[in-house]
Amino acid sequence: MDCVVQRLAFILLVAIMPLIAIGQEVKDAADYGFLPGNSAADNREALQSALNGGGKVIVDRQGTYDLTGTVFIDSGTHLTFADGVVINKCRDSAGEAPAYVFVNRGAFTRTYDHDITIEGLNLKINRINQGHSGAQPILGLQGSLSFFYVKNLTVRDFTTLDVGSANFALQVCTFEDIHIEGDKDGIHLGRGKGFVLRNCKMRTYDDPVALNAHDYIISNPELGWLEDGVVENCTDLAASETTGFFCRILAGGWREWAEGMELQNSDAVLSEGRIYRVNGQADGKRYVSRFRPVHEEGIKDYGDGIAWAMTQDGDIVDNCGVRDVTFKGVRLEKDRYNAICIMFDDNEYSRGYYPLSTVPTQGKFVFDGLEQAAEITDLISCGTPVDTIVISNSTLRGARVTFDQKNIDGLTYPPVNVELRNVEFVGDEGGGAYKVFYNPYGTDVRVRLLGCRSNVPLDLSGVEVVQSDLDEVTLRTGIRVCAADGRITFAVESRCKVTVVDVAGRTVLSGEYNPGTHTTSDLHPGVYVVNGIKVIV
């Protein structure tokens, strides 16, 4: 999220799924007084009455339904809207906006609700941001549809075109097993495990998909790892104006409170077995903490100017991030500098990594079947520690993978393993080599290329190529290699790491070499690989 949370319009087109099996008893919301033409307040009361206690509820009379306040959803609810039904988000009679349109009831007690399905919702948000009508908002939970502490959630065929400037369309945090088909940041996920986002067409000003294990204090009600997900058959639709990324992936790290800590807005600390966060202003101001937060709920200032929000009591961790996520069949139609950003926040709103905290390593990201149909500079940028990235069955047109580093005490970057499998690189045939990686800080990046092809030479300088089936003409690594008289000779253009392995994959030589020509000692006859280039001794 960039500065102010900006969320505008998106378009969703997905097939209508079978809604309710024949013969199943349902509650018709119209029988409770939920009808087009009724007042927004009356419709809220009627729909709430129909939903109380869960069960199958259908809204099947075509028309626009004004709705204000907040509607609470219980466990075991299956709510279906028929074609031609539009829910119109309204302010109440006092002009106050709803806290939420729909929210699960257990969110307010941090008690898990389960088995909730919403299908066919066509929601007109009218760019109305979060208010207080119907409920006191939970700090950090700000989707028109919000789910916090939920298991087995399905949202299907959800359409909204007019999200406001400071909220999300759908937000889910602290969950197990959610399934979302068709949606708008659009989709904002926090702490949880097991998610599927499928068949979504999105047109947003900011991020269509936010996988934010960490975030600003106003944008995540809890912190923790976000794991085991699939983002499949999704499209980032073209738009004339944009910010953010197709997908933002946020990590964070924090540590035990200590007197004298210098803190800013959104910083987190551990104290008394809980997580507390600074609920301040996004003005870049730093505060020196003199009093340990110990309260069990709410927000409290102990006298040093820091308003502490008790964020979590239970399932406590000291870092968070995203891991084990597969992106499959993603089509990128919007011009962006950066399409997929793996990052720490580091601005006046929030800093993801507090100095000397436990370092979170994100990773095991698979990008399969990416289709680049727009001007993109960085396909993927990595600003946090990452362990594994796989790109497969994709066509890239000038886009690169970038590795950044932040100079923060305690923050280290382990080696990154990158596999490019069946990737076609399309470059400008008159513009020289295709530079696949940008690695200005010298992150240890180890690359394998299998079944890849390119219409221009590939420049893989700045990384270590440990395996490749490309010929030396196509692969340019800043190193030239030849073999003669039982030795390998290699010339490097700039200081770089050189690794020589034998046909069995055993390392024969590895080290940093300055520009110039270097020769190995005598080697046994056989096939060797030098930074991805095969030679025969």
Image: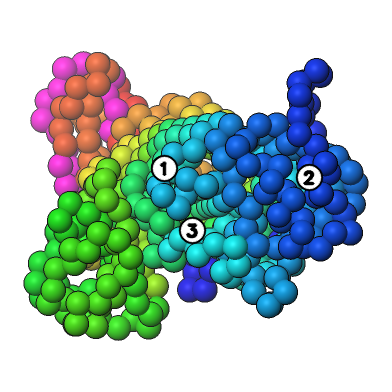
Residue 502: where, in percent of width, then height? 23, 21
| Residue stretch rendered in magenta on the structure | 511-530
Q: Which residue is mark 1?
A: 111
Q: Residues within 10 Å of mark 3 (few under 14, many from 20)?
A: many
Q: Which residue is mark 2?
A: 32
Q: Report how far apart the C-alphas of labels 2 and 3 lie in the structure.
A: 29 Å
Give me the residue at 59% from left, 49% from top.
Answer: 72
Nearer the camera: disc 2 or disc 1 = 2
Give me the residue at 43% from left, 63% from top.
Answer: 139
Q: Residues within 10 Å of mark 1 (few under 14, many from 20)?
A: few
The disc label shown at residue 141, or none: 3
Name the image colouring: rainbow
Give me the residue at 14% from left, 64% from top.
Answer: 257
* Three-letter amino acid code of the residue under disc 1: Thr
- Quadrant of the rendered structure where residue 64 is? bottom right
Residue 127: where, in percent of width, then height? 70, 69
Give me the residue at 60% from left, 63% from top.
Answer: 134
Residue 315: where, in percent of width, then height? 27, 43
* Three-letter amino acid code of the residue under disc 2: Tyr
Tell me which numbered mark, 3 or 1, is placed earlier along the sequence: 1
Q: Report how far apart the C-alphas of labels 2 and 1 lie in the structure.
A: 28 Å
**165 shown above or below 335:** below
User: In the structure shown, which secondary structural element does the residue marked by tag 2 occupy?
Assistant: helix
**302 shown above or below 188:** below
Residue 74 visible from this viewpoint: yes
Q: Quadrant of the C terminus?
A: top left
* Three-letter amino acid code of the residue under disc 3: Leu
